[in-house]
Image (spheres, rainbow, N blue to C red):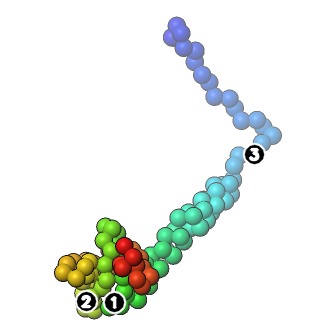
Amino acid sequence: MSLFISNAYAQAAPAGQPQGGGWDLIIMLVAFGLIFYFLIYRPQAKRVKEHRNLMAALAKGDEVLTQGGLVGRISKIAEDKDFVVLALNDSTEVTVQKAAISAVLPKGTLKSL
């Protein structure tokens, strides 16, 4: 039929080997599920829990670092809303979401900068 390409034919399965029963597929799916849980889901859930605890523990006077790179002292916390007011220096205040705070810094960090 074709001058340069030869036809490929499938071989018949050897008579001595049974066909796969499906257990291989189930074991492989369980293994992938465990890998997904231990390498992806569990560490991410742990990070989310730690960040939630960090946001709940914020208090007035804490020195914090935001995800945008701002460093400031918390001057006001709105409990009913998810916002805090950061004093960047004596005259500048910025309102940010609590979720934007990435770390609480040790006391005295602002003076050392």
Q: Residue tagged by mark 1? A: 61
Element at badge 1?
Answer: loop
Q: Residue at x 60, y 62 (%)?
A: 35
Q: Residue furthest top?
A: 3
Please tell me whether mark 3 sits on a helix, a strand or a loop.
loop
Q: Nearer the viewer, mark 1 or mark 3?
A: 1
Residue 85 quadrant: bottom left
Q: Quick check: can you spot residue 83?
A: no
Sooner in the amino-acid sequence: mark 2 or mark 3: 3
Q: Amino acid at mark 3?
A: Pro
Rounded to the nearest angstrom, the CA distance separating label 1 from label 3 is 72 Å
Give x and y (percent) for residue 8: 60, 22
Give the label on residue 82, or none. none
- Furthest toward the left, the residue is 91
Amino acid type for the residue under numbered disc 1: Gly
Secondary-structure class at tag 2: strand
Q: Residue, x 36% and y 79% (percent of image)?
A: 111
Q: Which residue is mark 2?
A: 76
Residue type at tag 2: Lys
Q: Looking at the figure, which quarter contains the C terminus?
A: bottom left
Any part of residue 76 in sight: yes
Labels 1 and 2 touching (C-beta < 8 A)? no
Q: Residue 31 appears in which quarter of the rendering?
A: bottom right
Location of residue 24 in the rendering, given as x and y in whole percent from the top left corner: 68, 54
Q: Residues within 10 Å of mark 3 (few under 14, many from 20)?
A: few
Mark closer to the observer (2, 3): 2
At a point 47% along the width and 79% down the height, the residue shown is 50
